[in-house]
Image (spheres, rainbow, N blue to C red):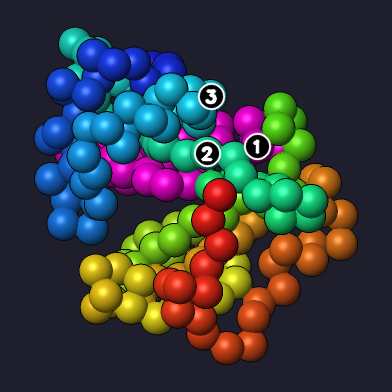
Amino acid sequence: MTTIRRFCCEDLLRFAPVNLDHLTETFNMSFYMSYLARWPDYFHVAEAPGNRIMGYIMGKVEGQGESWHGHVTAVTVACEYRRQQLAKKLMHLLEDISDNIDKAYFVDLFVRASNLPAIKMYEKLGYVVYRRVLRYYSGEEDGLDMRKALSRDVEKKSMVPLKRPVTPDELEYD
């Protein structure tokens, strides 16, 4: 049986095998620690029997006004645990926290333009491509900024796509 729980400091020493996928961004320890300290509600792990980490989601809440939103920084599932809808469960958890606790307008995420399986999964979850970010990944590969409106965005304004691509320096960060 799978257990989904909050990520804790000990997990930092046990989750490296999940990050072996070449499409998963791996960050330094201080990055993970800052998320864990600032946005603990947005950092969860899925655990298999025997305490094996199956996957995790890491995110935050940011923005102002109608740009107040949940952000998925990383969601990844180890290869041997894929096709069990685990990423979907983790995404729904972050969306629920963004919607019901933080009263965000939308959730967004960035995905490599070449990661077609992930893009299809996000589309099935109700995300749309809001904009293309040129050379977002390591200055080489384009990223897609995908969004899903939450209940506060009744008119779904947050999902209206931009007509032109942007560069990383045009993005706003909080």
Q: CA distance from mark 2 to mark 1?
A: 9 Å
Q: Secondary structure at mark 3?
A: helix
Instruction: Locate residue 19: give its quadrant.
Output: top left
Q: Secondary structure at mark 2?
A: strand
Q: Is residue 128 left or right of residue 133?
A: right
Residue 46: horizontal and vertical position, in percent?
Answer: 35, 25
Q: Secondary structure at mark 1?
A: helix
**Which residue is more in the foreground, 61 or 169?**
169
**Which residue is more in the foreground, 165 or 29?**
29
Q: Which mark is residue 41?
A: 3
- The mark closer to the camera, 2 or 1, is 2
Q: Which mark is residue 29?
A: none
Residue 149: horizontal and vertical position, in percent?
Answer: 71, 55
Residue that carries the numbered disc 2 in the rendered image: 60
Who comes first in sequence, dot 2 or dot 1?
Answer: 2
Instruction: Locate residue 33: give its quadrant.
Output: top left
Q: Residue at x 21, y 39 (%)?
A: 28
Question: Is 82 one of the magenta-colored residues?
Answer: yes
Q: Is residue 53 left or right of residue 150?
A: left
Magenta part of the protein: which range? Answer: 72-99
Who comes first in sequence, dot 2 or dot 3?
Answer: 3
Q: Residue at x 29, y 68 (%)?
A: 137
Instruction: Locate residue 140: give its quadrant.
Output: bottom left
Residue that carries the numbered disc 1 in the rendered image: 98
